[in-house]
Image (tube, grey):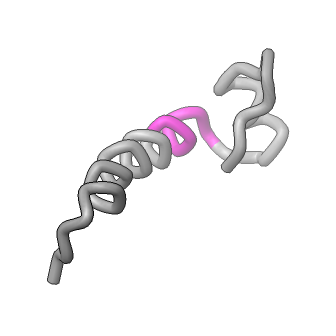
């Protein structure tokens, strides 16, 4: 999910009809996964 400038997590969640904790969980997962994606290592 792309965050637009000036939008809060609460606003994004309300706009999509989901709870704020879901947005935060997805963000946490994405940030954790990016380290693996950009490390160049293959994870099996």
- Residue 6 on image: x %, y %: 79, 16
In which image quadrant can residue 13 be found?
Answer: top right
Q: Is 32 left or right of 30, judged from the image as shown?
A: left
Which residue occupies 58% across, 33% down? 20
Instruction: Please say whether residue 23 is one of the residues in the magenta stretch.
Output: yes
Q: Is 20 left or right of 40, judged from the image as shown?
A: right
Given residues 40 and 36, the one toward you in this image is 40
- Residue 7 on image: x %, y %: 78, 22
Q: Is 8 left or right of 23, judged from the image as shown?
A: right
Q: Give the range drawn in magenta.
A: 19-24
Total marks shown come to 0
Which residue occupies 48% across, 41% down? 27
In which image quadrant can residue 5 be found?
Answer: top right
Q: Is residue 39 above or below residue 22?
A: below
Q: Residue furthest bottom?
A: 44
Q: In this view, does 20 lie above or below 31?
A: above
Q: Is the magenta stretch mostly helix, strand or loop?
A: helix
Given residues 7 and 43, the one toward you in this image is 43
Given residues 5 and 18, the one toward you in this image is 5
- Residue 19 on image: x %, y %: 61, 39
Which residue occupies 29% across, 49% down? 35
In which image quadrant can residue 43 be found?
Answer: bottom left
Instruction: Please say whether residue 22 is one of the residues in the magenta stretch.
Output: yes
Q: Residue furthest front?
A: 40
- Residue 30 on image: x %, y %: 43, 50
Which residue occupies 48% across, 48% down? 26
Q: Residue furthest right?
A: 15
């Amino acid at each position: 999910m792309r965050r637009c400038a000036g939008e809060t997590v609460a606003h994004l969640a309300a706009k999509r009809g989901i709870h704020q904790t879901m947005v935060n969980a997805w963000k946490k997962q994405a940030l954790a996964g990016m380290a693996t994606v950009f490390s160049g290592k293959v994870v099996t």
